[in-house]
Image (tube, rainbow, N blue to C red):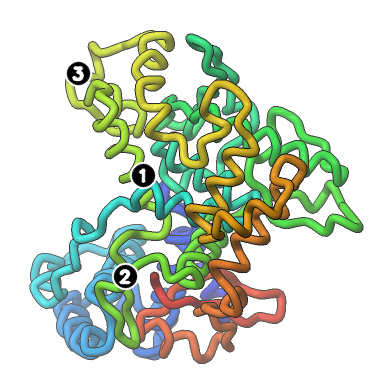
């Protein structure tokens, strides 16, 4: 796309509150469609403005082709991309209700379930420290994975309540969607450990520093290269880990579409809600802690922090994944023994030969990881770096945008 074309999509990139990744996916599809019809963005806008009916018929034919090889959600994404582009450029007259009749029904996500405590425990035991913190954060806060990129240390404030040391978390600070939730004592402990590990290699953290960051060169640390880690990166790594561990049964597995019995990140939010209900937390408090709107009640329901945390602590035992951090007292050796026995599958005879009290957490993690993953640790990558000229074909098959490399190639991935 030349400079004039790049300029013409800037309005879409700067518009609204769409997530960055969604905008980039929109733009890739718009460009691909424009190459298909042989028009520049300005020509396309003018053509549709003059004859929206002709566009409708052409797009319906395109939908028929795409829907034959792609998931229904991918077909709907093509529609959403072009609709957003035309609306942002004030093109009227397209009958989207007519177009929608030809869009296959999108598979509902309600088929997926929340993972069990034992399933999450196995994943956490194997995960690296950052991923471990991410899982504990999502399961104990109920936050959306999309909030991670905006999270700063000032958003995490220590709270002590009835002998518990946990943390209040402000999600989407400064935005209209801002709300407060909490993380468990276990999660808070691991977050502090994660920050400490980073500081030991030279990172200078402050209240404005990101909580989750990209991996850095520990031997040649450069403070200027510390950046918040992208949500797409976290989701991809989580999906790869789950696939390596063969943790989830596939509900659907075709060339262009995969679905699993529980989603790689959103499932942890379902786990949070399930465990809150199991713990007898007031439903309206659970909804508030998840950032859900509660209708007219939101105008009148204004609980204090103590009232919110008094409900949250009811669920701490059910939100604690690994055990040692969330419970009073020091049972570190017992915790390590439980992980090796229940998660790693070690026998009592094998563990009797180990000095668990003096073993580092990283050693335990390595032992469990090797036992669970074996030789599959480096498999399962479903990404490809391709030339821009090949993007359209991949998008039509359901691949999703990940990033644009300095070389000019585009990284795409199959949806999980």
Query: Relative to 45, is 184 on the left or the right?
Result: right
Identify the residue shown where x is 64% and y is 38%.
Answer: 333
Q: Residue 42 — which label?
A: none
Instruction: Using the numbered discs, state the Cα–Cα distance from disc 1 to disc 2 in whole angstroms.
Output: 19 Å
* In front: label 3 or label 2: 2
Can you identify the residue that label 2 sits on? 249
- 331, 91: nearer the viewer: 331
Image coordinates for residue 373, horizontal then vertical, percent: 56, 71
Q: Is 315 on the left or on the right of 79, as rendered?
A: right
Residue 114 screen position, x and y as percent: 30, 51
Identify the residue at image location x=56%, y=34%.
324
- Mark 3 — residue? 297
The foreground one among 57 and 323 is 323
Q: Which residue is mark 1?
A: 269
For label 2, the crowd category at 10 Å Cα-Cα, with few meaning under 14, some 14 to 19 and many 20 or more, is few
Of the image marks 3 and 2, the number of the one nearer the N terminus: 2
């Amino acid at each position: 796309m030349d400079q004039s074309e790049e300029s013409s999509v800037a309005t879409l990139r700067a518009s609204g509150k769409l997530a960055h990744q969604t905008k980039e996916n929109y733009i890739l599809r718009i460009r691909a469609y424009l190459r298909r019809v042989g028009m520049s963005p300005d020509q396309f806008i003018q053509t549709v403005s003059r004859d929206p009916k002709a566009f409708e018929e052409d797009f319906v034919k395109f939908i028929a082709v795409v829907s034959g090889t792609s998931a229904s959600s991918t077909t709907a994404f093509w529609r959403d991309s072009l609709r957003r582009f035309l609306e942002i450029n004030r093109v009227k007259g397209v009958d989207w209700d007519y177009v929608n009749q030809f869009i296959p029904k999108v598979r509902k996500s309600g088929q997926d379930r929340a993972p069990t405590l034992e399933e999450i425990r196995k994943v956490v035991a194997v995960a690296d420290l950052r991923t471990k913190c991410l899982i504990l954060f999502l399961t104990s806060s109920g936050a959306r994975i999309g909030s991670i990129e905006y999270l700063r240390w000032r958003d995490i404030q220590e709270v002590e309540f009835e002998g518990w040391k946990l943390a209040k978390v402000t999600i989407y600070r400064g935005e209209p969607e801002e709300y407060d939730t909490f993380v468990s004592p276990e999660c808070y402990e691991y977050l502090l450990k994660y920050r400490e590990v980073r500081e030991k290699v030279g990172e200078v953290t402050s209240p404005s520093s990101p909580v989750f960051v990209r991996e850095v060169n520990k031997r040649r640390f450069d403070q200027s290269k510390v950046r918040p880690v992208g949500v797409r990166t976290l989701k991809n790594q989580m999906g790869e880990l789950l696939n390596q561990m063969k943790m989830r049964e596939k509900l659907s597995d075709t060339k262009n579409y995969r679905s699993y019995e529980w989603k790689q990140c959103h499932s942890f939010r379902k786990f949070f809600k399930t465990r809150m209900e199991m713990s007898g937390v007031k439903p309206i408090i659970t909804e508030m802690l998840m950032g859900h709107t509660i209708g007219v009640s939101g105008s009148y329901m204004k609980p204090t922090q103590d009232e919110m945390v008094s409900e949250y602590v009811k669920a701490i035992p059910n939100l604690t994944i690994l055990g040692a951090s969330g419970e009073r007292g020091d049972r570190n050796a017992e915790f390590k023994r439980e992980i090796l026995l229940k998660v790693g599958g070690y026998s009592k005879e094998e563990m009797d030969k180990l000095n668990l009290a003096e073993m580092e957490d990283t050693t335990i993690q390595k032992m469990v990881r090797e036992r669970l993953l074996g030789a599959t640790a480096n498999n399962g990558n479903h990404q490809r770096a391709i030339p821009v000229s090949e993007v359209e074909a991949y998008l039509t098959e359901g691949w999703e945008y990940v990033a644009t490399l300095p070389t000019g190639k585009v990284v795409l991935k199959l949806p999980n």
